[in-house]
Image (spheres, rainbow, N blue to C red):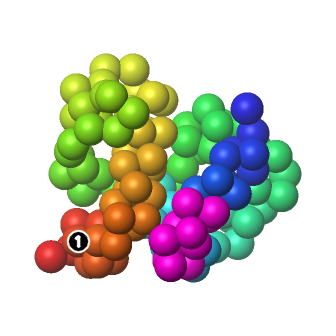
Amino acid sequence: MAFARVYPAYVNKAERKGRTKAEVDEIIRWLLGYSQADLESAIADGTDMRTFFERAPRPNPARSLITGTICGDRVQDIEEPLKREVRYLDKLIDELAKGRPMEKILRAG
């Protein structure tokens, strides 16, 4: 599946709760190290999910601080690397939609 097919769902979830596309992009850039231009290029090119996560330029080492449950999975306990990375992003978008402050989402404070 292409990341471009999932990305609008992330944006829609955030916007329905009064958050913005810019905040979704900031989360993705923080988590995976993409520049805004590279993120937009990956979306436009139809990059598949596996490639999108495997080619992440600089996965943030603080992503290991992401804990909790998303879709019935405890993110910190997921052993399959791709699924864990996807669930990290899912969890952050969920936190955004629930109104959590960006500094807490980005594990800065």
Instruction: Pick the residue in front: 55 or 45.
Output: 45
Residue 8 shown in magenta = no
Q: Quadrant of the N terminus?
A: top right
On the rendered structure, is 48 left or right of 61? Answer: right
Horizontal side, residue 34 vs residue 60: left or right: right
Eyeballing the image, is 65 above or below 95? above
Q: Callout 1: helix, strand or loop?
A: helix
The picture places residue 95, in percent across and down from the top left corner, at 34, 60
The residue type indicated by label 1 comes to Lys
Location of residue 51 by image quarter: top right
The residue positioned 54% from the left and 49% from the top of the image is 56
Q: Which residues are magenta?
A: 11-20
- Say whether residue 106 is visible: no
Residue farthest along the left direction in this orientation = 109
Relative to 32, is 40 on the left or the right? Answer: right
Q: Residue at x 29, y 71 (%)?
A: 100
The answer to whether residue 52 is visible is yes
Return the residue at label 1.
Answer: 104
Percent of width and height locating residue 80: 39, 20
Is 15 colored magenta in this rendering?
A: yes
* Crowding at mark 1 (Cα within 10 Å: few <14, some 14-19, many 20+): few
Instruction: Tell which residue pokes out farthest to the right in this image.
Output: 45
Q: Residue at x 82, y 46 (%)?
A: 46
Above or below residue 64? Residue 83 is above
Give whichever of 31, 97 is nearer the camera: 97
Magenta span: chief secondary structure: helix
